[in-house]
Image (tube, grey):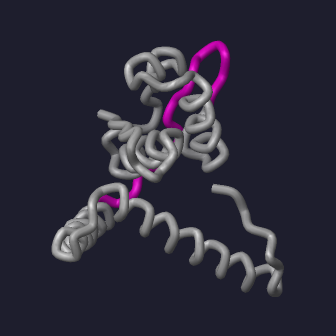
Amino acid sequence: MIIVDVSAAVPPYEQIRSQVAAQIRSGELPHGHRLPSIRQLAGDLRVAPGTVARAYSELESAGLISSSRASGSTVVAPQPATASIGELEVAVNRLLDEAVRAGLNRADLLGLVQSVWAKRKLSYLEESQGGSEDEESE
């Protein structure tokens, strides 16, 4: 199930992308699973088709799905070991506990995670490119 919070600081396409990616990585959406069409998911979530199209495009760029006009969009990602997902789930639960204690709401926490992720990604890129300031898009 995908939930889009239109009041969140995180754009709807990113909410869709991150939730589908998490479902693929956790094995909830197995290899070969056919995703809903762009129009179907857009209608179900009450967002513009372009929003879903962008999420699917980014998932395809990340190698998590494959899209074609004939067969639609299907999951192509290899499934990770169950133990690593379980360990991540424990860590996420600890993070959620800390966020609640700090008084953060869902949108604030997601914004914080994205900010830290972007900084880490930029730092990695600068190291691997010898200090280049070109940032790779997500």
Name the residue: 44% across, 62% down.
111
Residue 28 percent coordinates (x, y): 31, 41
Name the residue: 48% across, 40% down.
12
Does 48 appear above or below 99? above
Does 78 appear above or below 4? below
Number of marks in picture: 0
Name the residue: 31% across, 61% down.
85
Residue 132 percent coordinates (x, y): 83, 79
Residue 55 percent coordinates (x, y): 56, 38
Can residue 106 be seen here? The reply is yes
Where residue 101 sits, quadrant-wise, is bottom left
Name the residue: 45% across, 39% down.
16
Q: Is residue 31 left or right of residue 65?
A: left
Q: Say which quadrant the C terminus sits in.
A: bottom right
Does 2 appear above or below 11? above
Q: Is residue 10 left or right of residue 69?
A: left
Residue 98 percent coordinates (x, y): 21, 75
In this view, the residue in front, 46 or 135, is: 46
Q: Would residue 86 be counted in the magenta stretch?
A: no
Can residue 90 be seen here? The reply is no
Where residue 84 sits, quadrant-wise, is bottom left
Where residue 93 sits, quadrant-wise, is bottom left
Q: Would residue 81 be counted in the magenta stretch?
A: yes
In this view, the residue in front, 93 or 50, is: 50
- The segment highlighted magenta reads 67-82
Q: Is residue 128 left or right of residue 57?
A: right
